[in-house]
Structures are given as structure tokens and as C-alpha cells.
Amino acid sequence: MPHESDELLPTRWTLISRLKSWDDDESWREFFDLYWKLIYGVAVKSGLSPAEAQDAVQETVISVCKNIKSFKADPARGSFKSWLMQLTRWRVLDQVRKRPREEVARQHRPGAGQDESSQTTSTVARIADPAGNVLERIWDSEWERNLLSAALEKLERQVNAKHYQVFYLHVIKQCPVEKVAQVAGIKPDQVYVVKNRLGKMFKEALEQLEARMQ
């Protein structure tokens, strides 16, 4: 049973409420640490350059700062995850609109031997999709990837290095039990023991993170 002092607590709603105080530097650092990789990953996979993605992260955080007081920190009123996705979407579009027209046209001009139907859809068209389906798929994919990464980082801090290596190789990398046992210098049945014990801890970390970030 996690303690109230666990680093994954308090819940997202408590954090969001604290963000309404602009001078709460600790809460804003916590927010940034939780979400910047997500926003950056979404921006890059939406077609931005690394530099543009960094600007999108900065502008999204500024947008959160400007609009957080109007966001109701109440699960019944809607998802923070969806609200943050929309802010990110707008900031990604802002970066695309800043590009010189000639650059945008050059990047999306059909190549030799390529017909119009096979032309890559422009970043603006993809992200400005009225239904938001493309960015939503990218967002959901990055969300899950960041949850997995954060849960693994927490697990790595909680257990000894050899047990983490066994769990990572067998569960995450899907290496055979015999191969993992050989690499770690343990018996195959010990791989199963480590897998079961760390698997429970990993699942708990994922559930706590998911509850905190949604």
C-alpha cells in the first residue's frame, strides 16, 4: 500500500489545484517534469524539428500557466489529458505557421515519379484535422510510452540492479528465460520469481502514474 509521501502522490487534481498559484515554483517544476517529454514527443512526431518542438513545449507550458485558473480541477468536468492535448495541438500549429511559405511548399512538394495521391500530407493539414484524429493517435501513443518509461524509472530506483536487468530483459525486451538467466548469472526459476515480484511493483507504478496524469 503506497504511503502519502510516495513521489507519485498527490493525485493530478491536487497538483492542478496547486498550479493555480503561479508562484508555486515546486508545483510547476513537478508539472514540467511530468509532461515535457510527452509534449516534446508529440510535437516531433507531428512533424516539427527538435528546435520547433522545444519551442512548442515552452509555449504550451506558458499556455497552461495563462489558462490553468479557468480549468476546473474536477474529474466530473472533464479530462486534464484532453485539455492539455488541445493546448499542445495549438502550439504545434503555431510553430508550423511560423515557417516561411517557401519552406512549407518545398517540404511538401511531390517528388519525382510521385503522383498527387501519394503526396505526404502537410503537417498543418494533419494537425489541423477538425476531428483531431491524427494528433489524438500520436498523443495517445506518446502518453502510453511516457507512462511506461516513468514507471520503469521508478522501478529501477526501487530494486537492485540485477533484478531490474532481469525484469527489463525478460518482460520489456521479451528475451527468453534461458538467455536472461545466462546473462544475469542466475537459475531460470529465479527469473520467474523476479518477474512476478517486480511485475506487481511495475503495475502499481503504472496505475499510480496513470491516475496522476489523466
Image: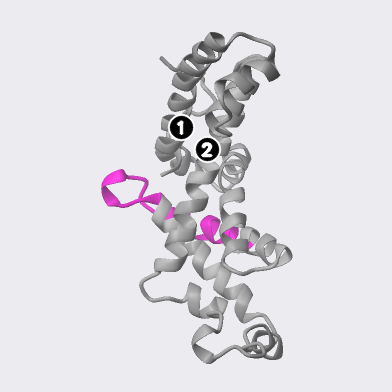
Closer to the camera in the image, 24 or 57: 57
Closer to the camera in the image, 49 or 22: 49
Residue identified by numbered label 2: 148
Image-quadrant location for residue 133: bottom left
Q: Residue at x 48, y 14 (%)?
A: 197
**Residue 68, magenta (yes or no):** yes
Is residue 164 among the parts visible in the rendering? no
The segment highlighted magenta reads 59-80
Residue 12: x percent and y percent? 44, 39
- 53 relative position to 83: left or right: right
- 71 relative position to 108: left or right: left
Q: Are marks 2 and 1 in contact (CB under 8 Å)?
A: yes
Residue type beneath disc 1 = Leu
Give SS at disc 1: helix
Magenta stretch: dominant SS?
helix
Q: Residue at x 61, y 81 (%)?
A: 97
Residue 27: x percent and y percent? 57, 39
Q: Residue furthest left?
A: 76
Residue 90: x percent and y percent? 51, 70
Q: Residue furthest front?
A: 178
| Marker count (numbered) | 2
Q: Relative to residue 65, is residue 192 depicted above or below?
A: above
Residue type beneath disc 2 = Leu
Give SS at disc 2: helix
Image-quadrant location for residue 48: bottom right
Residue identified by numbered label 1: 206
Residue 18: x percent and y percent? 49, 40
Q: Residue at x 62, y 21 (%)?
A: 180
Q: Relative to residue 213, is residue 139 depicted above or below?
A: below
Crowding at dot 1, Cα within 10 Å, few <14 / some 14-19 / many 20+, comes out as: many
